[in-house]
Amino acid sequence: MKVKLLAHTPEPEKVCALAMRGCRLRNAPVEEDLTKPVEYYIKLAKRLGHTSVLEHANATFNIEGISRVTSHQLVRHRIASYSQQSQRVVKPTNTQDWYVTPPSIAKVDAYRYHSGMQKIKEYYEKFLQLGIPIEDARYFLPNATKTNITMTMNARSLLNFFNLRLSEHAQWETRIMARLMLEEVKKVAPTIFEGI
Ligand SMILES: Cc1cc2nc3c(=O)[nH]c(=O)nc-3n(C[C@H](O)[C@H](O)[C@H](O)COP(=O)(O)OP(=O)(O)OC[C@H]3O[C@@H](n4cnc5c(N)ncnc54)[C@H](O)[C@@H]3O)c2cc1C
């Protein structure tokens, strides 16, 4: 899979720090009101649980080549915005590498798995040749089918997402995706995501 940080709020930590500072000012906050380093306000917000100020920092990711298992787990996170590749329009079997293989299966019986996928691809493409609409032929596709999704999530929601999806209880593929997302956002907002 590939995870790319497509865009983010400019100076995300400064924006959140200003929002935090403004809660205690008579006037709307400006940069000169930050009498302490930006990191101070972010740490304070986290410590107090005043985490709504972290909603002012947004990150948009392009996530490519995850299974429909993982994209389904991702979109359960409601405090976010999503745009996903349409299986009513795009034929996923067009590429050779169109499905995800779990390492546990690859280790035990890769042959059976890949032959099954080959059969599914043949049947799916046959349905299309027979004139079945692409939106119906897709009912035959497996959970392993790869997809791409663009997601925008604010930092508060990301903290919740990382907390749940980096845990050992989360699915391995979702954990890999979450880890790659965390690496990206840490580059632009290290204090917000410190300690994860
Ligand atoms: C290990 C693991 C196993 C899971 N297994 C299953 C499963 O078997 N079946 C299943 O259906 N789901 C399962 N889930 C999904 C899980 O129940 C959540 O739907 C998903 O993780 C999204 O989390 P969230 O609601 O915190 O996120 P978001 O939807 O982004 O919500 C963020 C926060 O907003 C608040 N919030 C949002 N909506 C509401 C609301 N309607 N009412 C009150 N507060 C709200 C909550 O505080 C919530 O934590 C699993 C998740 C994990 C991590």
Image (tube, rainbow, N blue to C red):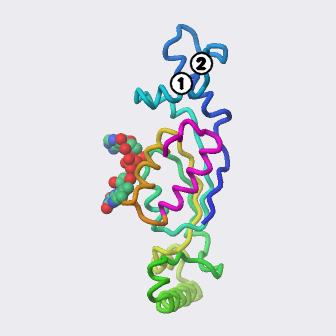
Q: Earlier in the sequence, mark 2 or mark 1?
A: 2
Residue at the extreme front: 195
- Mark 2 Cβ inside 8 Å of ligand 1: no
User: Where, by quadrant of the figure, is residue 73 drawn?
Assistant: bottom left
Q: CA distance from mark 2 to mark 1?
A: 8 Å
Point out which mark residue 41 bears.
1
Callout 2: helix, strand or loop? loop
Q: Is 21 one of the magenta-colored residues? A: no
Residue found at x 57% / y 9%: 27
Image position, residue 121 (x, y; %): 55, 86
Q: Is residue 165 left or right of residue 4?
A: left
Question: Residues in magenta?
Answer: 174-196
Q: Residues within 10 Å of mark 1 (few under 14, many from 20)?
A: many
Q: Amino acid at mark 1?
A: Tyr
Callout 1: helix, strand or loop? helix
Image position, residue 108 (x, y; %): 44, 87
Which residue in the protein does label 2 denote? 36
Residue at the extreme top: 26
Residue found at x 45% / y 62%: 72
Q: Quadrant of the N terminus?
A: bottom right
Q: Amino acid at mark 2?
A: Lys
Q: Is residue 64 above or below residue 95?
A: above
Image position, residue 159 (x, y; %): 47, 43
Q: Residues within 10 Å of mark 2 (few under 14, many from 20)?
A: few
Q: Is residue 192 above or below residue 108?
A: above
Q: Is residue 193 left or right of residue 50?
A: right
Q: Is 186 one of the magenta-colored residues? A: yes
The residue closer to the viewer here, 185 or 123, is 185
State the predominant SS element of the stretch in magenta: helix
Residue found at x 48% / y 38%: 156
Query: Mark 2 near mark 1, Cβ–Cβ under 8 Å?
Result: yes
Residue found at x 57% / y 55%: 83
